[in-house]
């Protein structure tokens, strides 16, 4: 059982659902987002299990890695670290936004690594780290140059961190279009096109992503795994 969980990027989407799942099991969960007020609000809206567990929110800005050590100073120990924070970036070659691309690359590659570096001595030896990548690593599209590159970089982080952090396990989950996520829900043209690209004809759900995340966090033999959950690509 994971009793102490840090979810960076837990104020919305899959990260928030994962935080709520562990809180309902009685875990002590810290939700981190770049805005302290939003993180505290998200934490207050999650109901922990009766008789145990606690949820609190803190500010951690992955795009400012030099501030991460101080932001995490009061976390004494942790069983699992979930790094789900990201910045959406539609950035074409013709109209390239250097600032946006830099923020995304720093957040995921440097920010993710800095969190693990900062907490490396405070992670339980039987604990685990879960990084969030994305399907764009395999299926690039116009404007995805930075997203595709960074998510491929997450695979590289899994390869190196799983060795450097051992015996702590390090894995990644790579979602694509999640049909009922707040970002995609209701966008029928995108959902229909994505559905047609899957072998099952069914889009993954938030629950699917949470279940896959829990597997990677808790299965003691899951290490160095990059798990893509997309229904199979046609």
Image: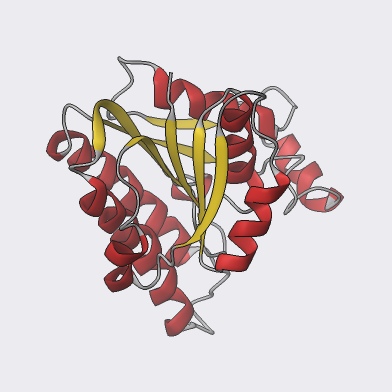
Residue 145 sits above or below residue 210 on the image: below
> In front: 212, or 46?
46
Occupied quadrant, residue 193: top right
Quadrant location, the N terminus: top left
Occupied quadrant, residue 232: top right
- Answer left or right for 185 relative to 51: right
Instruction: Residue at 86%, 50% (x, y): give it.
Output: 186
Residue 58 sits above or below residue 103 on the image: above
Could you tell me residue 217's position as x and y percent? 41, 27
Could you tell me residue 212's position as x and y percent? 53, 25
Q: Is residue 176 visible?
A: no
> In front: 190, or 76?
76
Could you tell me residue 173's position as x and y percent? 46, 36
Residue 26 sits above or below residue 156 on the image: above
Quadrant location, the C terminus: top right
Residue 106 sits above or below residue 21 on the image: below
Instruction: Residue at 56%, 25% (x, y): give it.
Output: 26
Could you tell me residue 27's position as x and y percent? 51, 29
> In front: 46, or 207?
46
Instruction: Residue at 49%, 83% (x, y): give it.
Output: 97
């Amino acid at each position: 059982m994971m009793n102490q969980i840090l979810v960076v990027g837990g104020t919305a989407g899959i990260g928030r659902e994962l935080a709520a799942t562990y809180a309902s099991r009685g875990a002590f969960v810290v939700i981190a987002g770049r805005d302290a007020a939003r993180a505290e609000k998200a934490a207050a809206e999650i109901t922990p299990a009766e008789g145990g567990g606690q949820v609190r929110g803190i500010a951690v800005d992955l795009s400012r890695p030099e501030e991460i050590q101080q932001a995490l100073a009061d976390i004494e120990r942790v069983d699992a670290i979930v790094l789900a924070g990201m910045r959406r970036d539609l950035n074409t070659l013709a109209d390239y936004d250097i600032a946006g691309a830099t923020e995304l690359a720093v957040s995921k590659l440097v920010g993710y690594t800095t969190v693990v570096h900062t907490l490396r001595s405070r992670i339980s030896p039987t604990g685990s780290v879960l990084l969030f990548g994305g399907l764009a690593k395999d299926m690039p599209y116009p404007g995805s140059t930075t997203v595709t590159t960074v998510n491929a970089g997450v695979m590289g982080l899994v390869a190196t961190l799983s060795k450097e952090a051992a015996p702590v396990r390090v894995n990644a989950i790579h979602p694509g279009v999640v049909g009922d996520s707040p970002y995609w829900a209701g966008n029928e043209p995108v959902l229909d096109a994505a559905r047609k690209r899957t072998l099952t004809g069914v889009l993954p759900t938030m629950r699917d992503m949470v279940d896959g995340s829990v597997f990677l966090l808790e299965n003691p033999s899951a290490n160095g795994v990059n798990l893509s959950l997309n229904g199979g690509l046609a």
